[in-house]
Amino acid sequence: MPGAEPNNKKMSIIVTKGTLDWAYPPFILSTTAAAMDVEVTMFFTFYGLQLLKKDLGHLQVSTLGNPAMEMPLMGMHMKMPNLVSAFPGMDAACSRLMKNLIKKKGVASIEDLREAAIDSGVRLIGCQMTLDLFEWGPGDMIGEMEIGGAATYMENALASDINLFI
Amino acid sequence: MAELDARGLNCPMPILRTKKALKDLAAGDILTVQATDPGSVKDFEAFCRTTGNTLMETSEDDGVYTYVIKKN
């Protein structure tokens, strides 16, 4: 259970994206809220389900259509033209660069943040429909995942003080 | 007196580690946290206000922030 004295505040987050950069906001917010005695439920749907896979090594960032991305490289900030993303291995290279940057700056890995979320009692609910859609089975996902549908989310959201769509 | 070294860790790790460390303490115990994340100044104030712990002292020396927290 999160915290010794829950303050009766609840937060629910719908997680819809499964890239490395978008994995951060939901897990940072959920772990911090749990540390502040908020009861947190995260509902993962569509690409958000990537974040509940057993192995998170596959999370990537894309250089395509990401005009806000500026990577610190060689003392400058590099923007990636869309054309560059057509080169094979570009997303993988950029993701590796991002992961190195994350480690260098003392930012937690998504693995660590997810574990912290689980340790502090954050509920992780996977969307049943998306699991069916992409044919992912329980063997692909972490054991802490609960399964639910839109009504499960809705009941939770109605009782929550904070509802986020990420 | 318990100490936590959160230097070199970026948000939200200093807060998460602090919460974990506080769990093992009794009411009235003091925890001293060191962090280098400049964002942690406001964060520790907010954390203590929301969780009801007392931020007794905040200081900074050469980029290292020290927070003295009393568990309530």
Image (tube, grey):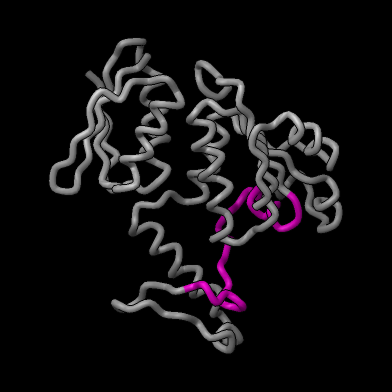
Count of all numbered marks drawn on residues in the image: 0
Check the image and name the residue furthest to the top: B27
Quadrant housing residue B28: top left
Check the image and name the residue furthest to the left: B62
Tell me, yes or no, if residue B20 can be seen here. Answer: no
Residue B11 image position (x, y, % from top left): 40, 46
Q: Which quadrant: the N terminus of chain A? A: top right
Q: Residue at x 62, y 33 (%)?
A: A40
Q: Nearer the viewer, residue A16 or A99?
A: A16
Residue A121 image position (x, y, % from top left): 59, 29
Question: In the rendered structure, does residue A76 fall within the stretch colored magenta?
Answer: no
Q: Residue at x 85, y 37 (%)?
A: A151
Q: Nearer the viewer, residue A164 or A151?
A: A164
A161 relative to B36, above or below: above
Q: Is residue B42 left or right of residue A116?
A: left
Task: Read off the magenta span.
Answer: A45-69
Q: Nearer the viewer, residue A101 or A144?
A: A101
A106 relative to B65, above or below: below
Q: Main secondary structure of the magenta part?
A: loop
Q: Residue at x 71, y 47 (%)?
A: A44
Q: Residue at x 18, y 40 (%)?
A: B60
Residue A140 image position (x, y, % from top left): 71, 50
Q: Nearer the viewer, residue A136 or A18?
A: A18
Tell me, yes or no, if residue A89 can be seen here. Answer: yes
Question: In the rendered structure, does residue A51 fall within the stretch colored magenta?
Answer: yes
Q: Is residue B7 left or right of residue A129?
A: left
A89 relative to A58, above or below: below
Residue B35 image position (x, y, % from top left): 27, 41
